[in-house]
Amino acid sequence: MQNGEQVEISGANLVRIAGRITFRRDTSNKLIFYSVRGVGSEIQVMANFKFYEDKEDFPKINEILRRGDVIGIIGVAGMPPSATLHSHFLVTRKKELYSVIT
């Protein structure tokens, strides 16, 4: 995949990851970026309403997710347009909250 190349959001391209949220940046109520750290690596996750599977769940799950929470993510792996060689990027279709930091 080349930088900025369009990615087809289909079942054949889906990956599943789990990790702890280390950073969250809200760009709008329909576009949120998360940094998620797993075992030894960190990826950037783009939560975009347009690609999200359950439109009703999108605002609910993103409202409760905080830094430190452990989540599971299903999405399509790719590289953002301004990617470096070490960037990993995931466009989400679904998120699940596994553990909450209180």
Image (cartoon, rainbow, N blue to C red):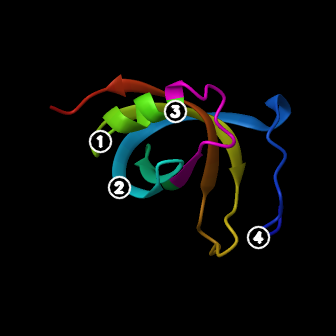
Asked if 31 appears above or below 97 in the picture, the reply is below
In the rendered structure, which segment of residues is drawn in magenta? 44-57
Of mark 2 and mark 1, the one earlier in the sequence is 2
Quadrant of the frame with the C terminus: top left
Of mark 4 and mark 2, the one earlier in the sequence is 4
Is 45 situated left or right of 6 in this image? left
The label shown at residue 66 is 1
Q: Amino acid at mark 3?
A: Phe
Which residue bears the numbered disc 4? 3
Closer mark to the observer between disc 1 and disc 4: 1
Which residue bears the numbered disc 3? 58
Q: Between marks 4 and 2, how big is the CA–CA gap?
A: 23 Å
Residue found 66% across the figure and 28% down from its top: 53
Of mark 2 and mark 3, the one earlier in the sequence is 2
Q: Position of residue 57 (x, y in %)?
A: 51, 25
Asked if 65 appears above or below 53 in the picture, the reply is below
Of mark 4 and mark 3, the one earlier in the sequence is 4
Q: Is residue 54 magenta?
A: yes
